[in-house]
Image (cartoon, helix red, strand yellow):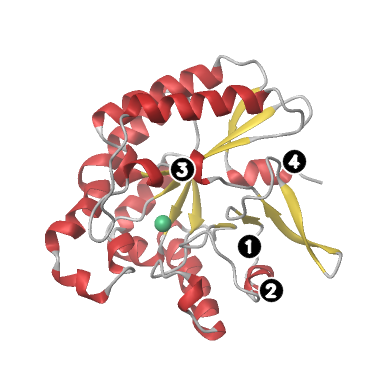
Amino acid sequence: MADIFPVVLGICLDAEAIWLSKSPANRDRPVLLSTGSYAIREGLNPLLDLLDANDAKASFFVPGITADRYPGAVKLLHDRGHELCSHTYNHLPVMGLTPAQERDELVRGIEAVERHSGVRPTSWRSASWEWSAHTLDYLVDEGVEVSCNFQDSLRPYRHLKNGAPTPVIELPVHWHLADAPYFLYGGDIQRRVRPVTEVETIWMDEFDATYDWPGTYFQLTLHVQLMAHPSRLKMLDRILKHMKSRSRVRIMTCCEVSKAVS
Ligand SMILES: [Zn+2]
């Protein structure tokens, strides 16, 4: 890690799951759900083309329900060489689940992605960037090797249990390096959508400053339905080109970065 600066694009393909998980009543709101459907219908292909043009492989976090609804999208991601990662089954926040439900969500989510990609995912993100007291045990049991949830470091690190190392590597994330706080809108979430110039400044400034901190890495947390709009894709293209202009930058998948952590 000392001679390279890993950059991870952790991209959620939530589609309708993001709204279905917030309220059962949203099943009957086709227009609200359509903001998630955009990811499949319109957004995914131009995003994949942009990644190809920048020679960038991303890590795509797919809820099991989305994988089952859109198996062709999962296959497409696999065929284009991206990492398929798990993102629970129903995209439910862990805080409202019993331990048995949490384990079931984890297992079914992994199995759905495996069923449609042919590869068992080893990287995982919860639906809400939260863990319970049981999460680490469940991740170890299911062979998960990468978590992208905690916000306590700028560096990948290994999770410990009772002071002993586990197989689970954390690739920390941060709210200010995610698209949702700036672009997520709809349902009960009513706030000012930010201009791309503002978000680009925040992400570029943070990248440039982090690059100078030895031993760190950089992850952007994105959603296909939020980022794959024309002006936002142009912004992402500028950011990728800027990052790749720095000599130590390597755009890597979660799995690849985790292998470099001792
Ligand atoms: Zn999500």
Query: Which residue in the rendered view is the most extreme toward the right?
Result: 163
* Separation (CA) of disc 2 from disc 4: 23 Å
Specify whether tag 3 is near ligand 1 (CB below 8 Å).
no
Tell me the amino acid under the disc marked 2. Answer: Asp
Counting residues from the N terminus, which is met first, the one under dot 3 or under dot 1? 1
Q: Earlier in the sequence, mark 1 or mark 4?
A: 1
Alpha carbons under labels 2 and 3: distance apart: 27 Å
Q: Eyeballing the image, is 78 above or below 19? A: above
Q: Residue at x 20, y 47 (%)?
A: 41
Mark drawn on residue 144: 1
Please tell me whether residue 57 is drawn above or below residue 13 in the rendered image.
above
In primary-sequence order, the first of circles 2 and 1 is 2
Q: How many angstroms separate mark 3 from mark 1 (CA)?
A: 23 Å
To which quarter of the image does residue 160 belong? bottom right
Mark 2–mark 1 distance (CA, rounded to whole Å): 10 Å
Residue 262 shown left or right of residue 107 in the figure: right
Given residues 86 and 134, the one toward you in this image is 134
- The tag on residue 260 is 4
In the rendered structure, find residue 137 and report the number of the disc placed on it: 2
Q: Earlier in the sequence, mark 2 or mark 4?
A: 2
Q: Tell which tag, 2 or 3, sits nearer the viewer.
A: 3
Callout 2: SS: helix
39 left or right of 240 in image: left
Can you tell which of label 3 and label 1 is closer to the viewer? 3
Task: Report the number of numbered marks.
Answer: 4
* Mark whose residue sits in front, 2 or 4: 2
* Residue type at tag 4: Ala
Q: Residue at x 28, y 48 (%)?
A: 191
Percent coordinates x, y for residue 247 in the rendering: 65, 15
Mark 1: few, some, or many residues within 10 Å (few <14, many ≥20)?
A: many
Density class for disc 3 (Cα within 10 Å; few <14, some 14-19, many ≥20) is some
